[in-house]
Image: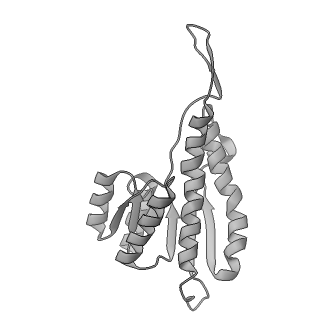
Amino acid sequence: IIPGGASGLGAATTRRLASRGVKVAIFDMNETVGQALASELGGVYCNVDVTSEEQVDTAFAKARAAIGQERILVNCAGTADAVKTVSRDKKTGEIRPCAADRFNRIIQINLVGTFRCIAKSAAGMLTLAPLTDGERGVIVNTASAAAQDGQVGQASYAASKAAIVGMTLPIARDMMDEGIRINTMMP
């Protein structure tokens, strides 16, 4: 299962997994592109907003009905926003703080959406018998170099990606005795 699997890094991941014989399920909001890619690769497309618990539950159920219980989850769903914490209008001098709702939107998509998919996938993986090496599954999250070196206007994005990095080790420790590996990449 690849949340955010219809474009960019997610699409590349989807293609790579499919080329290795993995049955893929794309979770994405871009129905046109997601459905086309799923059709091309013989996978399944689920239109899902990762900020919605109900949509994520529905997508996991649909994907599992079509391709079986996943052993691989690659979290690529995410977005960015370019807005300074406080900005000043160059013409009027008006000072405008960034709205907390705008900041929270990025946190909900990038961080909470990632966590939501981890929890749902890991719960499903626990129902599987371990493979001969004891592994039940693997979860890979996508953070960003911005987690350590965010740029101007990237406070929400950098915070969300740093939090993904920060939750990886505790979640890996939660799952280590269950045979589920958790890693995060920082492109």
Q: Nearer the viewer, residue 29 or 101?
A: 101
Q: Residue furthest bottom?
A: 132
> In which quarter of the view is residue 183 placed?
bottom right
Residue at the far front: name it.
54
In this rendering, would 89 be left or right of 62?
A: right
Q: Is residue 89 above or below residue 19?
A: above
| Residue toward you, 135 or 112 | 112
Is 175 above or below relative to 150? Answer: below
Q: Position of residue 42 (x, y in %)?
A: 29, 71
Q: Look at 47% across and 60% down and name the residue there.
A: 54
Residue drawn at point x = 61 percent, y = 28 percent: 98
**Quadrant location of residue 120?**
bottom right
Q: How is the image coloured?
A: one colour
Q: Quadrant of the N terminus?
A: bottom left
| Lateral position of residue 184 relative to residue 34, left or right | right
x, y percentage for residue 123?
Answer: 57, 75
* Residue 143 in view here: no
**Considering only vertical position in the picture, is 46 above or below 103?**
below
Is there any visible trace of residue 12 in the rendered image? yes
